[in-house]
Structures are given as C-alpha cells and as structure tokens.
Amino acid sequence: MTIEEIQNEIIDEFSMFEDWEERYQYMIDLGKTLPLIQEQFKTDDHIIKGCQSKVWVHAEMNDDKVEFTADSDAIITKGIIAILIRAFSNQHPKDIIEANTDFIDKIGLKEHLSPTRANGLVSMIKQLKMYAIAYQTQLN
C-alpha cells in the first residue's frame, strides 16, 4: 500500500468514532500494536527531541524501504507514534520525504492535543522524515 492509501485508511477508521474520547481510546489501542523498539535502541540517541514524553524511534533499511520501530513512556504518545509508523514504515525513503501529512489534520488530531503534545507530534514527523533523508542520501 502507498502512504496515501494507508493515510486514507486511518482517516476512514477515525471517522467511525463519534467523539474524541472514543478516538483517544482507539489511539491507545493502536499504541498497543506498535512494533516495539528493541531495548538496545532505547537510548538518548533514539529519543525524539521536542516531545514532553519519552519517545524512542529506530529506523533501518530493508529491501530499499525504511522500517521503523518505536516506544513511548506515555500511552497517548505511543498511540500517536503508532499512527505515524503505520503510515510511513515499510516505504521507500523518497516517498516518506515527499509524503503529505494532511491526514493528521483530517482526523482532527492536532486540534485535540495539548500544545506540548502537538509540538511533539511535529517533532515525531520531522524525525521520521530525517531518517528517510539519511537513507535516501545513502541510496544516491
């Protein structure tokens, strides 16, 4: 599936819920399905700067695609990074770099986060794209 197809799937899933309490619960459930980062990568080098909670992300290339794993010490944040990893993991670096992130606004996530969590969301997106840029540079 393309990033856009996955994002549209996420938008459809979130539109099934009538209120934000249900959406938060869904994000928490998504966080429980997150491909967890190995303990050896839970280091300061893998922490996303700009997040109120601790969020660790690791990326590696497999068959010219970037695979992400992550974890967080907060359940909502874990759900947020799970959504992002679902959209961007197992994709080509170029596609991640060029991907639009409007789906975040379409599910209403940014407007329902505290300012510090919204900043953390931006930092998470930025970090995933930075990994993609690094891998794209290696491919060129």
Image (tube, grey):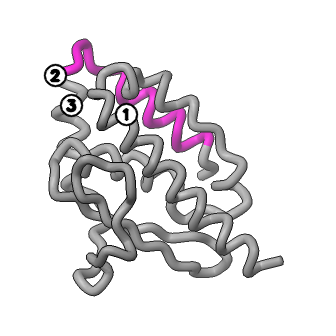
Q: Is residue 8 magenta?
A: yes
Residue 91: mark in rendering: none
Regarding mark 2 in the picture, which secondary structure is present there?
helix
The amino acid on which the numbered mark 2 sits, given as a three-letter code, is Glu
Badge 3 density bin: few <14, some 14–19, many ≥20, Cα 10 Å? some
| Disc nearer the start of the sequence (3/1) | 3
Residue range highlighted in magenta: 4-20
Q: Nearer the viewer, residue 72 or 26?
A: 72
Q: With respect to residue 3, does 113 lie above or below?
A: above
Is the Cβ of the residue at disc 1 closer than 8 Å to that at disc 2? no
Question: Which residue is located at x 60 percent, y 47 percent?
Answer: 3
Q: Amino acid at mark 3?
A: Tyr
Q: Amino acid at mark 1?
A: Ala
Tag 1 residue: 118
Give residue 92's quadrant in the image: bottom right
Image marks 3 and 2: residues in contact by CB distance under 8 Å: yes
